[in-house]
Image: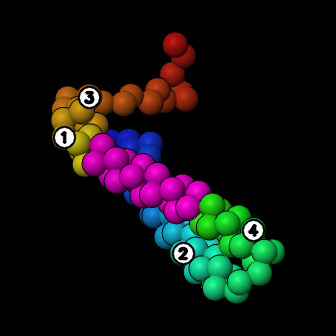
Amino acid sequence: MFFRFSTNRFSQATNSIAATVFIVGMLLLGFSLFIFAVPELIGYIVAALFFLAGVSVLGYAVRLFIMAHQFNRRMGQDRGDRSYRRNVEIHVPDEDRDY
């Protein structure tokens, strides 16, 4: 029996969050370009805000993807002899004995 305190679920959750954030960032960029096509002063201001928000969200998504990739790589390296040790037993004392 060996114990693993972190699972692949963390990586899957991070990937799904990163994908959602990436889609939101792309939508924000699309909306900003659509608003930028409208030649009004308010449109330019709102377009700039949407564009900056989209770039920020895309940067956040890329950081999450990188973090998930690094986590997967580290989990792959830890599957060697470091996470499972031979000749190590866990002894659970019987409740009948007095120690």
- In the picture of the structure, the residue carrying the numbered disc 1 is 80
Instruction: Using the image, determine if residue 13 lies above or below residue 85.
Output: below
- Give me the C-alpha separation between circle 4 and circle 3: 65 Å
Which element carries disc 1, helix, strand or loop? Answer: loop
* Left or right for 15, reference 40: left
In three-dimensional space, the C-alpha distance between marks 1 and 4, rounded to whole angstroms, equals 54 Å
- Disc 4 secondary structure class: helix
77 lies left or right of 14: left
Residue 45 image label: 4
Q: Nearer the viewer, mark 2 or mark 3?
A: 2
- The residue tagged 3 is 88
39 relative to 80 in the view: left or right: right
Instruction: Give the x, y percent position of residue 15.
Output: 46, 64
SS at mark 2? helix
Judging by the rendered image, the residue that carries numbered circle 2 is 26
Q: Amino acid at mark 2?
A: Met
